[in-house]
Amino acid sequence: MNRQTKAQILSDLLAVKRVKTMRTMQYERLKPFDDNRIRTRLIPFGTETGRLASKGDGTRPWFSEPLTNLQNLNKKVARLDPLYNIREILIPTPGYAFVECDLSQVEMVLTAAYSEDWEKVARYEEGEDEHTRTGLLFGGSASDPATRILGKFANHSLNYGLSARGFKQKVNKDVDIHGISVSETEAKRYVGAYHRANPLLLQWWSTVRRVHSTVGQLTNAYGRRRAFLAHSVGLELISYLPSSTAADHLNHLLVKAVNKFTDCRLVLQVHDSVLFEVPIARVRKVCREMRDLMTKSIRINGHAVTVLADVSVGYDNWGNMKEVK
């Protein structure tokens, strides 16, 4: 059995599993209340990084509406089939449109800043596609979509010290979506190439572990401190500074956005993005002003690092968002 056949079998099995998961964990739990609204419960202090957590743990005595977790509505599986695009059932209030603002590749650029890779930061701020650049390290071509996909996987996981086996599992888990699978031998080669291309990253890992061992805590650019147990020296330790800084940065800007756009309605925060309902007559102006407001810099290691923001609009539903250039 060749590698392509194995990948196809794995892809088919995953697709069958996703059908069951989407039915039981996505569609069946999206039960609206009498006013046809679906609600979630946001927890301001639900994570160590400062990101808002969302829960859907049934009806509470003091809140009669059924609750569901709106942060984990699977977006990437919608590429497989329109049936999976569960966000399409969420529509804006009549007279409003959805406007979503996302901090573009924020953890990647913050990791580069904390590791003092200012060349990578400059490329990001100039709008270069770092995912394709990373994928080319693995021998791909710029015209092959797989090159960027592998580069994106690498930038989102190898930055935090994921092993070759972990990288293989992460890529292969979604083979039915992107059609790419890697062997452990290939994963080892990719990880080695990534480490050689990012020596400052490895030095930063050592610095983080040294600070942890001597001080026992880490403090991000916003002053958020976290103490770690002695055995917490893995991915969670390495990822804390970029991920918590991204969360604090987004929350800081979210407060400004809510205070500025008083005629808009905050709907949800999902990871590095925020979703608003905006009066249709105001969409173009709000998109422009929201991008300006959310594109701000953070001072890290003596440098001002600008985090870029992408804005998209959905007039019909949350599953059909179009980026505003």
Image (spheres, grey):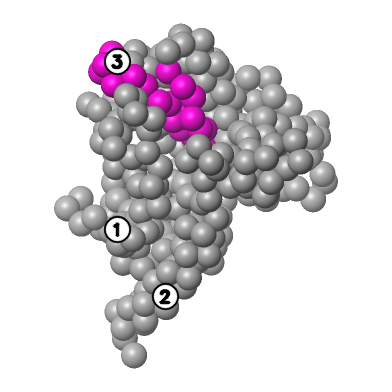
Q: Position of residue 284 (x, y in %)?
A: 25, 18
Residue 285 visible in image:
yes
Badge 2 local density, few (<14 within 10 Å), some, or many (20+)? few
Q: Which residue is mark 1?
A: 82
Residue 282's disc is 3
* C-alpha separation, residue under disc 3 versus residue under disc 1: 30 Å
Residues shaded magenta: 264-285
Label 2 sits on residue: 16
Say above or below: 125 vs 234. Answer: above
Amino acid on which disc 1 is placed: Pro
Is residue 275 magenta-colored?
yes
Q: Quadrant of the N terminus?
A: bottom left
The reply to whether discs 3 and 2 touch (Cβ–Cβ < 8 Å) is: no
In this picture, residue 230 sits left or right of residue 35: right
Secondary element at image label 2: helix
Whether residue 161 appears in magenta in the rendering, the answer is no
Q: Is residue 72 left or right of residue 210?
A: left
Left or right, 106 with respect to 216, comes to left
Which class describes the residues within 10 Å of circle 3: few (<14), some (14-19), or many (20+)?
A: few
Between residue 244 and residue 131, name the one nearer to us. 244
Figure check: 242 above or below 72? above
Secondary-structure class at tag 3? helix
- Label whose residue precedes the other's in the sequence (2 or 1): 2
Q: CA distance from mark 3 to mark 2?
A: 43 Å
Answer few, some or many: residues within 10 Å of disc 1's Cα (few below 14, many 20 plus, some between 14 and 19). Answer: few
Question: In whole angstroms, how far apart are the C-alphas of marks 2 and 1?
Answer: 15 Å
Q: Nearest to the eye among marks 3 and 2: give it.
A: 3
Residue at 47% across / 41% down in the picture? 36
What residue lies at 57% left-to-right and 35% top-to-bottom?
243
